[in-house]
Amino acid sequence: MVIVICILIFLFSNQPGEDSSKISDNLFIRKLGHFSEYAILGFWSFIYFANLLIKDINNNKTIRVSIASLIFSMFYAITDEIHQLFVPGRDGNIKDVALDTCGAFFGILVVNILFTYFVTKKSEKNHSL
């Protein structure tokens, strides 16, 4: 899923500025798109790294997975903005990297809340047996 999301982000970023503006001329909508696509990337990269690195979920391990997910998402945001430097009518923007990273952080936060909820529920269920 992470690869699919990265490809979609790449394809959106590969659109020339004129084509991108046709989709949405509204700055808020475009920035919301940045935030949203990286929130989804952060969410799924957490799940990927959790499956890769963790056998048993606990808070110490989820923190490490969260950091790995955030670093991965931020790195991808940086490379995405560099890529846009080579797309006609587009430019790389450090503010977009910050916005993308905030989106990734939000996605990671959401998946952490869900993990905590379900791990707590599972733990309560096991203790009640």
Image: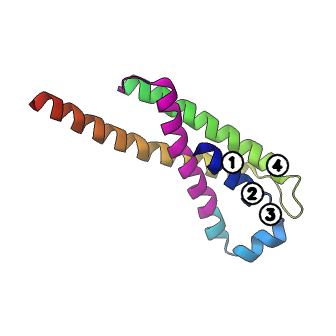
Q: Secondary structure at mark 2?
A: helix
> Disc 1 vs disc 3: which is toward the camera?
3
Residue segment shown in magenta: 32-58
- The reply to whether the C-beta atoms of the residues labelled 1 and 4 are less than 8 Å apart is no
Which amino acid is tagged 4? His
Q: Give the distance between the C-alpha atoms of the residues marked 1 and 2, in whole angstroms.
A: 17 Å
Q: Which mark is residue 15?
A: 3
State the SS at label 4: helix
The location of residue 60, given as percent across then percent down, is: 40, 23
Q: Earlier in the sequence, mark 1 or mark 3?
A: 3
**According to the image, label 4 marks what residue?**
83
- Left or right of 128: which side holds 116? right
Mark 1 → mark 3, Cα distance in angstroms: 18 Å
Marks 3 and 2 sit apart, C-alpha to C-alpha, by 7 Å
Find disc 1 in the rendering and name its residue: 97
* Marks 2 and 4, how far apart at CA: 11 Å
Badge 2 amino acid? Leu
Q: Earlier in the sequence, mark 4 or mark 3?
A: 3
- The label nearer to you, 1 versus 4, is 4
